[in-house]
Amino acid sequence: MEFFHMPTCVKNLVAQYFSDLQMCFSLQDFTTGWQQLEVGIAMGCAISPILFVAAFEIILIGARQMVGGIKLPTGQRLPPLRSYMDDVTSLLQTAACTSRLLKRMDELMLWARMKIKPSKSRSLSLRRGVRNDSTIFVVGG
């Protein structure tokens, strides 16, 4: 919230709201005890998704600083990362740049106490317009 210059009164209100967030599950004949929530987006909460997107934007800004994107023949430069919520697409020219970006994303996700799910990740490497399956990228271990 500091990064986005939110007023102190808003930061304090949000901090108070999340300071003791608890939940329990109820079934017909059983109710669990109250559980402290520490990580994740609370369903039905209007603030959680906004804070998640803001935090993820900081991660993307940190990752974008590692690579420059692709320069088009017109001189324009495509951004290296595009995202929607927590889905990220990278467009880079070399495998070395991609590896460097993924390493930085791993570092930033660890810093934010988030995890990349390698099982949900995909890569497509093209060399001179032909698919190149020999290039292997590693993310999240």
Image (cartoon, helix red, strand yellow):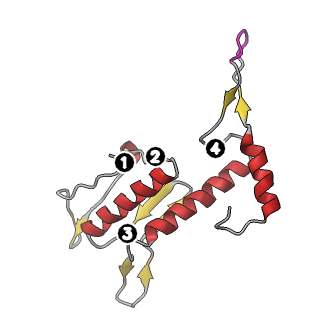
Say which residue appears at 38% left-offset and 50% top-offset. 121
Q: Earlier in the sequence, mark 1 or mark 2?
A: 2
Q: Which residue is mark 1?
A: 140
Cα distance in 3D space between marks 1 and 2: 7 Å
Say which residue appears at 52% left-offset and 52% top-offset. 112
Q: Which mark is residue 91?
A: 3
| Amino acid type, residue under disc 4 in the picture | Ile
Cα distance in 3D space between marks 4 and 1: 21 Å
Query: Horizontally, is 89 left or right of 27 in the view?
Result: left
Determine contact: label 4, label 1, CB under 8 Å: no
Q: Which residue is mark 2?
A: 115
- Give the quarter of the image for residue 8: bottom right
Query: Horizontally, is 106 left or right of 87 in the view?
Result: left
Tag 2: Cα neighbours inside 10 Å, few (<14), some, or many (≥20)?
Answer: some
Give percent across and percent down for residue 42: 68, 40
Give percent across and percent down for residue 3: 64, 67
Give percent across and percent down for residue 124: 30, 59
Determine contact: label 1, label 2, CB under 8 Å: yes
Q: Tag 2's secondary structure?
A: loop
Q: Which residue is mark 4?
A: 41
* Above or below: residue 2 compared with residue 86: below
Q: Earlier in the sequence, mark 2 or mark 4?
A: 4
